[in-house]
Image: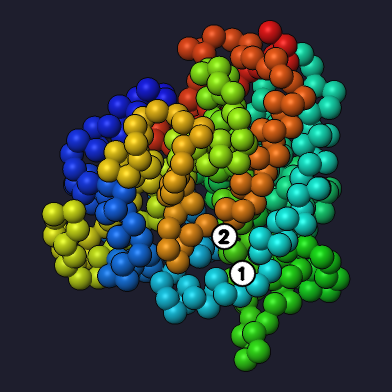
Amino acid sequence: MTAPDRDAFLAELARQGPVCRGTYVDGTPVWLVTGYPESVAVLTDPRFSSDVTRQSRIDLAALAGLPDDVAPYLLHTLGVYDPPDHTRLRRLVSREFTARRVERMRPRIQEIVDALLSGLPEEFDLIERFAHPLPVQVICELLGVPPADRGTWRSWAADLGAPDLEKVAAGARALVGYMSELIDAKRAAPGDDLLSGLVRVQEADGDRLSDEELISMSISILIAGHETTVGLISQSVWLLLTRRIDPGDISSAVEEFLRFTGSAEIAVMRYSLEPVEIGGVTIPQGEAVQVVYAAANRDPRRFDQPGRLDLRRPDNAHLAFGHGIHYCLGAALARCETQIALATLLDRFPGLTLSVPASEIGWQPGMKRALTSLPVRTAP
């Protein structure tokens, strides 16, 4: 789906009302929630469950091509638990994955960005040489993945999104096996990294993350912290170059990029635990409910001229990182990386331009908004 197609699709959803009927990718009926206040209501109402074990009509493991022996490690992330299980897991993970840890990484992120931008040719693919390797290196350093293993990790993570289901299965098994070994290594020789912290974190009552939970949380942090940040950085640069606009204050600009083109376009699926009236519609018990962040972030009831990219937009309470108890744990890291990446890139190459016409830049097919490449040159 190209960028204009996406905008037209979101506009059509909005015309159908803040809550409407749709279908999931496997044809399963689903309620689509596209209005901003209605989305906030679903994301905060305990009558909507995130627990995938409550419903079996949508086989997420089969859709993703994941074998049964490793599917739980990749699907059972924080986003698919309800309280009290979610409360327990988030409390344990939050003790180590903190904004303070991210801030301590800021100088190192700057070093990584500087190194990636040094020695580049006059023309290069910004995704291949910058937007992709940056979050991979940052997330691997955050977790404590040894430098020698990072290339292999990147390959396995890429396999998870491959169209070949055998490749998906092989990548998933390899990644789970590696994480199990790495956790054992951190337990024997802990460091100052996040994974070592998660291994040793323990509540006063003795509660701690199991090995299965450690594997699941680590893979979740890897995938979520990698893919979404690649998309955010590359699409932000694409918008800056195609619209020829001055970003001004980088922090404010990043918030508008998150609202306008945030790569997390939909929430984790919810299920109604009882009949719920929302947006003038009664959703029966046991129905699948999909919040569409990308549509809610363009709701004119919440945002003035939502289709306009306004890098100085005030009161920008977007839903790019979710809302409520499932608000993204990695939000601070994504903001930090993107702010440093954009500020340094534009400072280093003030004359940065596209090296091909904008119409020739491709987008990956499907609803997921992602560029296939971003060819640029360092001077006009």
Q: Position of residue 170 (x, y in %)?
A: 60, 49
In the rendered view, tell whether residue 379 sits above or below residue 194: above
Instruction: Tell me the distance, in whole angstroms, between the alpha carbons under discs 2 and 1.
Output: 8 Å
Q: Quadrant of the C terminus?
A: top right
User: In the rendered view, would you say 338 is above or below 332?
Assistant: above
Q: Amino acid at mark 1?
A: Ser
Could you tell me which residue is drawn at 66 percent across and 89 percent down?
204
Q: Residues within 10 Å of mark 1 (few under 14, many from 20)?
A: few
Q: How many marks?
A: 2
**Identity, as a three-letter code, of the amino acid under mark 2:** Leu
The answer to whether 52 appears left or right of 351 in the picture is left
- The colour mode here is rainbow
Q: Earlier in the sequence, mark 2 or mark 1?
A: 1
Tell me the residue that label 1 is attached to.
Answer: 94
Q: Is residue 112 visible?
A: yes
Q: Residue at x 84, y 27 (%)?
A: 118
**Residue for point 19% across, 46% down:** 20
Question: Is any atom of residue 70 visible in this view?
Answer: no
Q: Is the C-beta separation of discs 2 and 1 under 8 Å?
A: yes
Residue 28 vs residue 103: left or right?
A: left
Task: Report crowding for label 2: few under 14, some 14 to 19, many 20 or more residues within 10 A (C-alpha).
Answer: some
Q: Which residue in the protein does label 2 denote?
A: 329
* Image quarter of residue 342: top right
Q: Quadrant where the N terminus lies?
A: top left
- Compared to residue 177, the image places residue 303 above or below, namely above
